Amino acid sequence: MTGRIAVTPRALSRGGHLALAALETAGYEVFFPAPGRQPTLEEQLRFLPSCVGYLAGVEPISREVLSTARVLKVISRNGVGTDAIDLDAAAEFGIAVETAAGANAQGVAELAVTLMLAGLRHIPAQDAALKAGRWQRLEGREVAGRTLGVIGCGQIGRRVARLGLGLGLSVRAFDAVPDPSFAPAGDFSFTSLEDLLAQADVVTLHCPPTAHPLIDKQALTTMKPGAYLINTARSALVDDEAVGQALDNGTLVGYATDVFDREPPDPREFHQHPRVITTPHIGGYTKESVERATRAAVENLLRVLSARP
């Protein structure tokens, strides 16, 4: 046996995955310390000191935890985010951090577009009303001819842009480092954040977390009245209190989010707002995304571990 590897992503830790067999074939002991849920800090402190590899989900991985992991060589995420990991501590302790870049991009992009369509047609509210015995018809909006604002034009944002163009939307994108080679057919252009917020009927977030909320009270005052906001990226990008006020005063017609400060989130009145749609972090939770992400995470583990004595 060449060492232990902990597997904690919720999509894998309850039922496993065929791709994990490659780790066992290579001689590693694969185990699931918290089946179906995120491990707690106390559990991490118990299991990580014996691990050479960590196939991690979205749980926080702190300096305190990493300081006890004396034989840990690599943390391999089955997604792209690393903001939950203390990267400085990982570098200090010589622990590689790998991600499954692009593996869940299509799934997240499709969810963002799904939330846009569901919100603009009031699908959740009308479904709930009909199931409760009420015939409630709410006038919706068509997307064709409207403007979609994509904040963050990486692998996910580019897919959202193409999907939006296919639906007949004009697309305006903002990226900190725009790539001029990305020029899809249709009414697409890069623009400033300020112009995007002022023009877009729908704004969707696909960028890394920022030090302060990107969509705060000030940003909301510059948005087109009656805009729709979607967040499938990181909860820290949005000031929930400001969004709640914008929903009440009509600045926003609706808000959809797949991400929360903690999972599952604490019960909040904001999440019960009739024009808020919530989904339990399912952007990358498709059969295809899980398959791609798991195989990439396993390959990254084997590559890093085989390169070390």
Image (spheres, rainbow, N blue to C red):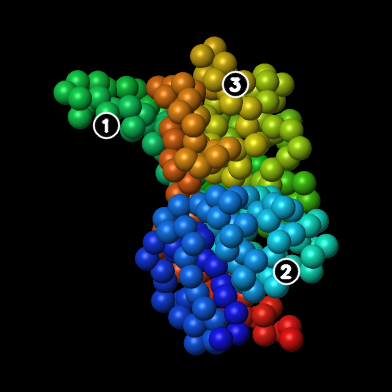
How many C-alpha atoms fall within 10 Å of the one at disc 2: few (<14), some, or many (≥20)?
A: some
Q: Amino acid at mark 2?
A: Arg
| Residue drawn at the location 20% of the way across and 29% of the way down | 131
Picture disc at residue 127: 1
Residue at 70% of width from left, 73% of height from top? Answer: 71
Quick one: which residue is furthest to the right in this view? 92
Q: CA distance from mark 1 to mark 2?
A: 52 Å
Quadrant in which the C terminus is drawn: bottom right
Q: Residue at x 73, y 40 (%)?
A: 210
Asked whether 28 or 194 is in front, the reply is 28
What's the CA distance linking mark 3 and mark 1? 27 Å
Q: Quadrant of the N terminus?
A: bottom right
Question: For the residue labelled by badge 2, is the local secondary structure a helix, a strand or a loop?
Answer: loop
Q: Are the two marked residues, 3 and 2, in contact with CB atoms closer than 8 angstroms? A: no
Q: Position of residue 150 (x, y in %)?
A: 62, 42
**Which residue matches tag 2?**
70
